[in-house]
Amino acid sequence: MSVEAQPSQILIKSLRVQNFRRHQDFSLDLDNKNTIITGENGSGKTSLIEAIYIALAGKSWRSNFSEITRRGAKWWRADVELGHEKRVIKFQNQQKQFKIDGDESKILPKTKRRQTVLFEPNHLNLLSGSPSRRRDFFDKLIADQNYSYQKTLRQFDRVLKQRNTLLKNAAPRDQLFTWDIQFTNLAAEIVAARRQTIDKINQTISDEYQKIAFKNDKIQLAYDYYSDSFAVNRQTILDELTRNFSREVACGHTSIGPHQHDISFVFNSKPAELTVSRGENRTIILALKKIEYEMKKSTRPLILLDDILSEFDEKHQRNLMKSFFDNQVIITSVKAIKNHKFKEVKIQNV
């Protein structure tokens, strides 16, 4: 099932946070299309973007809700004015509450979630981090386009746990057969979705990188477990499970499948994690974020860029920001952007 139709434009007009991390009570006017929030490290810039993200996505990318509460406080609250809509998020007594124009719920309904393109510094660990980090990143990107993919991942996790339990108990082959069929069907769906997304990204990632970096470097993503020419279907995965059954009983867990796969980055025909500089690493991730924006463009996503400009000179900053001007952009930075029509909001250490 595809993502449901969304408003033609997301426009955050204002934000107020109370007892939200370091902020006791802070309000922010965001009536300009492009805003840059500046301040020293530790002043609470990221927290403001986090509050907006929660209002749109229903969750934080940083932590659970209880960790957001300001030290010494017993509750927190975020008020966001979104177009003609007002959203209030409260957390007290370990309970969440979302209120949209008076309608209350414990979670943000799917129909009220809004697309974002978020860059946050932990994304810079994507190339050199663990395979699970890369799997999670691309699985989220796919799920943002197709809600049914998230359901497929949840079903796969349940089947995987049950299959692992049977393997640990040295169950005979016939007891695993039903679970193997379910595992195979779900695994094939996941692999197909990942490969389709990788193929789509590979069509433009080098071009996007070159637009930012002013260099002719070539970037490529690779699904490390299966080559592009290898036909993956339910039968090939089931055959793999059959061949590995004895070994998996011995080790007590499922050793093959999409939970073990990796997606790697190739930079000028060499492993990116071994060859790229810090600036090149950042540029690769930003090129990937630009592609994410293009994939979500029809939904007019809000663009949230946390500490995006570090290590970029003025020329690269200008070129980067040209990519995102179609939609509302909110940036955090220690310093303002020169020669750009951004409304600057300075915040002091709190």
Image: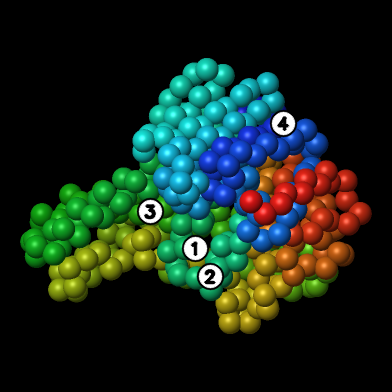
Mark closer to the chain start, 4 or 2: 4
Dot 1 falls on a residue whose secondary structure is helix
Q: Which residue is drawn at 64% across and 51% down?
A: 350
C-alpha gap between disc 4 and disc 2: 39 Å
**Comes first in the chain, label 3 or label 4:** 4
Q: According to the image, label 1 marks what residue?
A: 134
Horizontal relation, residue 155 to residue 252: left or right: right
Q: Residues within 10 Å of mark 3 (few under 14, many from 20)?
A: many
Identity of the residue drawn at 69% across and 25% down: 83
Q: Earlier in the sequence, mark 2 or mark 3?
A: 3
For marks 4 and 2, give the one nearer the viewer: 4
Q: How far apart in space, not on screen, are marks 3 and 4 (Cα)?
A: 44 Å
The three-letter amino acid code for the residue at tag 3 is Ala
The residue closer to the viewer here, 242 or 116, is: 116
Q: Which residue lies furthest to the right in this view?
A: 339
Amino acid tagged 2: Ser
Q: How far apart are marks 1 and 4 (CA)?
A: 34 Å
Q: Is residue 97 above or below residue 209?
A: above
* Residue 74, percent from left and from top: 43, 39
Using the rendered image of the protein, determine whether residue 111 is visible from the camera's viewpoint: no
Please report the residue visible at 65 percent of the width from the left and 39 percent of the height from the top: 26
